[in-house]
Amino acid sequence: MEPEFTYDLLIVGGGINGAGIARDAAGRGLAVALCEQGDFGGATSSASSKLIHGGLRYLEHGELHMVRHALREREALLAIAPHISRQVRFVLPHVRELRPAWMIRLGLLLYDHLGARSSLPPSQAIDLQASPYGEALKPELRKGFVYSDGWIDDARLVILNLRSAVLHGATVLPRTRFVTAHPEHRGWVARLQSTDGRWTDVRARVLVNAAGPWVDEVLSATSATTARPRVRLVKGSHIVVRRLYEGEHAYLLQNDDRRVVFVIPFGANHTLIGTTDLAVNSPLTPMTISPPEVEYLCEAVGRYLRTAVSPKQVVWSYAGVRALFNDHHQNPSSVTRDYTLALDQVQGSTVLSVLGGKLTVYRRLAEAALAKLERWLEPSRGTWTAGEPLPGGALGAGGMSGLIEALRARHPGVPPALVHTLAQRHGTLTDAVLRSVRSEADLGIHFGAQLFEREVDYLIRHEWAQTGDDVLWRRTKAGLDMSEAERIRLDQYVRERVASQSMEPSPARGGG
Ligand SMILES: Cc1cc2nc3c(=O)[nH]c(=O)nc-3n(C[C@H](O)[C@H](O)[C@H](O)COP(=O)(O)OP(=O)(O)OC[C@H]3O[C@@H](n4cnc5c(N)ncnc54)[C@H](O)[C@@H]3O)c2cc1C
């Protein structure tokens, strides 16, 4: 007799890949549970460069297939998440000794056309001395190229996928660790432990291991034999400094080790610089940037920009681990960024592991994962996630500017700059955040950097925020513009609020 499974899928890991699979599967009518040991998006998926891109540099490694797919996904993501993403023009200063101009021109031509029907402006060669794009650069740089890519708020992308999954019926469990699972009746019984010490057993037909840097560890906990590590761990770090130049364009700087460093506007007042590539042995390696990495990034900028950057100017930094599919390349920068989906059978029970990947391709990865699992599941519909905006993303014909105008008209008592900030975080859900707010006084405590009690409560209630860091560095980046004292006050507020709400029934459902 077929046993009763509570869930079709138990997904381990609430990074972008777990969240994307949960959304897709729940929308196909499957019974989905997802557990995340920490905060959603709290590991690699909030530590990226936040680019939705094909990766110009990967053309050099011959990864045409991956770049093509990623460029197509760039279009899809800009369309389903228009409130948390934007197009960016990248300026690539030319240095003859590093790469010949013909090679860059050829690469950009490919990049323009590989994705097919791109809505983004094409690349062009520019005279840096005559172009405003050259103003921030050293005067000796004369020639350059401009091309287009996308940027997205990575941590919010995770949250929006999870919110969509919940709207489609998924159960999501923050701060709940998958400890072990044993096969039973061609399915799994998994043991989960939440941070308050509670244990739960979950029965699921299929296990999806989307544990990122912990993927090998989770696989071992299912008794699947892992003869050798399936992923290579490569740490990457970023620094943030006060804004280095005017304008919304970014720079792609060629380094003399043949790597590239991105310099990207970050919020209204800051510039993001990254990244590094360092092989590490454990996901538990302290996830902080090291002084040599800071030096490396400052030097890269110093070679190109008029304004030098010193380690003392760094106001924030973050580091994350890429879990890359182990293709046995020696150099961490050369290991493929493409993903592999590995199926294992343990005594007739199925576990699917996600190895590698990019933020950019998470949606396609989710589709591929469900295609691989089709014979064990009975979805009620086919692929759907490319055609349905993420929560808050159905902006209508007027796009972002139309939405902001309409929000300002609907909320005349709210400062226009705050409406603008909220719209870029919540899109059409801004109305839910501002429900019954008539004047600034209704917004409650101002914690600094346009972060008000009203929004913080919303993030706790609908977006699973439970600590100050969840709010300051993932649901928003307000932490960047706040003083230490303001951040401590916010953290205390969040903890007290969460403690008082734990008495109330089920949060984080619905659109607010
Ligand atoms: C420095 C850097 C820059 C990058 N830049 C870009 C970029 O610009 N564009 C791009 O497309 N990609 C980029 N990437 C790649 C991208 O960030 C990753 O591919 C993506 O975030 C991986 O998501 P994930 O869900 O697989 O892993 P994670 O985000 O790491 O999620 C895995 C989750 O599993 C949880 N977990 C682990 N073990 C357990 C357990 N036992 N129980 C419960 N939960 C568990 C972890 O806590 C974690 O939250 C970058 C990566 C790095 C490191």
Image (cartoon, rainbow, N blue to C red):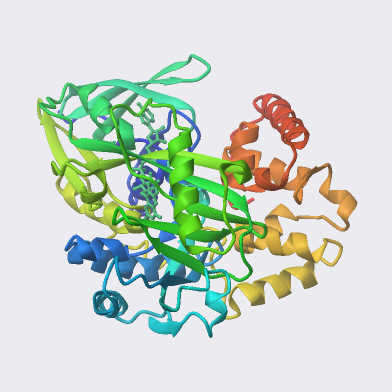
Task: Residue at 34% x, 54% y: name it.
Answer: 362
Q: Position of residue 355 (x, y in %)?
A: 23, 42
Looking at the image, residue 276 lies above or below residue 78 = above
Left or right of 200: which side holds 434?
Answer: right
Residue 145 seen: yes
**Is residue 67 depicted above or below 10 in this figure?**
below
Q: Residue at x 24, y 69 (%)?
A: 68
Ligand 1 location (quadrant):
top left
In the rendered view, would you say 270 is above or below 91? Answer: above
Q: Quadrant of residue 361?
A: bottom left
The quadrant the N terminus occupies is top left
- Residue 41 can be seen in this image: no
Q: Tell me how many marks there are.
A: 0
Q: Position of residue 295 (x, y in %)?
A: 47, 43
Percent across and percent down for residue 4 are: 26, 30
Residue lying at 21% horizontally and 39% vertically, measured from the top left = 352
Q: Nearer the viewer, residue 356 or 312?
A: 312
Nearest the eye: 314 or 476: 314
Q: Residue at x 28, y 80 (%)?
A: 109
Q: Residue furthest front?
A: 140
Query: x%, y% of residue 407?
Result: 73, 68
Judge left or right: residue 130 versus residue 282. Answer: right
Of residues 407 and 138, the one nearer the viewer is 138
Between 428 and 503, the one lying in front of the other is: 428
